[in-house]
Image (cartoon, grey):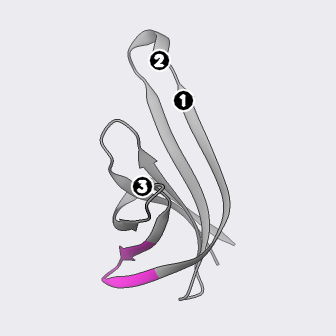
Amino acid sequence: MTRLFRIPQPLLVEGGANGEPRAFTWRRRVHRITAVLNHWRVQLDWWDGAEVARDYYQVNTDTGLMADLYCEQNTGQWFLERVYD
């Protein structure tokens, strides 16, 4: 089962030297990333001024979560989009 958040949850993320997430805080708990399972980039609608540019990461954590996170490229803000149970 998965939980897709209609409104993505803002995250505080600790990043590595190459920009990959190493840990994030969600619901007042630190989740250390044990594996990055997938990484992809989405860049849409740049031609009409409503650009979406995001780096997505599917990760496993030391707390047992598998989750999809993304970083907005234009602001650097991180969000939690999906949690797999």
Describe the element under mark 1 as helix, strand or loop: strand
Quadrant housing the N terminus: bottom right
Q: Main secondary structure of the magenta part?
A: strand
Q: Give the residue pinned by disc 2.
A: 46
The residue drawn where x is 30% and y is 83% is 28
Give the number of the disc on residue 43: 1
Image location (x, y in percent) of residue 9: 38, 61
Quadrant housing the C terminus: bottom right
Q: How far separated are the C-alphas under marks 1 and 3?
A: 18 Å
Residue 7 is a magenta residue? no
Most foreground residue, 20 or 42:
20
Most foreground residue, 22 or 43:
22
The reply to whether dot 1 and dot 2 touch (C-beta < 8 Å) is: yes
User: Which residue occupies the extreme top position in the image?
Assistant: 47
The reply to whether dot 1 and dot 3 touch (C-beta < 8 Å) is: no
The reply to whether dot 3 and dot 2 touch (C-beta < 8 Å) is: no
Quadrant of the image occupied by residue 62: bottom right
Dot 3 or dot 2, earlier in sequence: 3
Mark 2 residue type: Trp
Vertical side of 37 occupied by 49: above or below: above
Image location (x, y in percent) of residue 65: 58, 80
Would residue 29 appear left or right of 39 to someone viewing this image? left
Vertical side of 39 occupied by 60: above or below: below
Give the number of the disc on residue 8: 3
Mark 3 residue type: Pro
Describe the element under mark 3 as helix, strand or loop: strand
Per the rendered image, the range of residues in magenta is 23-31
The residue drawn where x is 36% and y is 85% is 29
- Camera-nearest label, 1 or 3: 1
Q: How far separated are the C-alphas under marks 1 and 2?
A: 7 Å
